[in-house]
Amino acid sequence: MRFLTNWLGKNPDGNSVDASTGATVNSYSTLTATWNGTDIAGKVVNNGSYRLCMELSDANATGNFSYFAFTKGATVDKQTPADKPSFSNITISWTPK
C-alpha cells in the first residue's frame, strides 16, 4: 500500500472514503468493481458528479493513476472512456434503483 501515493496522499488515515483495494494479482485480467451509491456509513449520497479513481502499484513501485468522471443521478449514465496508461477497455455504468 505504501506505493499508492495518490491514495495515501489524499487519505492519510487509510480507507476514509468509499473505496476498494486489492492485493497484487499474478496476472493481468479484467477487474470489476461495483458501488451502491452509499458512503462508508451506508447512507445514500446525493446525486451529482463523482469520480472513479484508479491507481496501480506494480513490482513494488509507484504506478499510474487516472480518474474518470460519471454522474450519479435519476437516469442511467453509461460510458466507455478513452484508454489511459495501464487502464484500458473501461466501462462505467451508473444505473439508479
Image: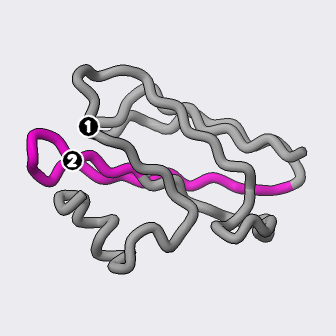
Q: Position of residue 53 (x, y in %)?
A: 44, 55
Looking at the image, which is closer to me, 81 or 95? Answer: 95
Q: Position of residue 14 (x, y in %)?
A: 39, 71
Q: Position of residue 67 (x, y in %)?
A: 43, 54
Question: What residue does disc 2 label?
Answer: 57
Side of 32 relative to 4 (left or right): right
Looking at the image, which is closer to me, 69 or 23? Answer: 23
The amino acid type, in three-letter code, at marker 1 is: Thr
Element at label 2: strand
Residues at badges 1 and 2 in contact (C-beta under 8 Å)? Answer: yes
Disc 1 crowd rating (10 Å Cα; few below 14, some 14-19, many 20+) is few
Which region shows up in magenta? 54-73
Quarter of the figure that contains the C terminus: top right
Q: Which numbered marker is on residue 24? A: 1
The amino acid type, in three-letter code, at marker 2 is: Ser
Disc 2 crowd rating (10 Å Cα; few below 14, some 14-19, many 20+) is some
Quarter of the figure that contains the N terminus: bottom left
Q: Position of residue 55 (x, y in %)?
A: 32, 51
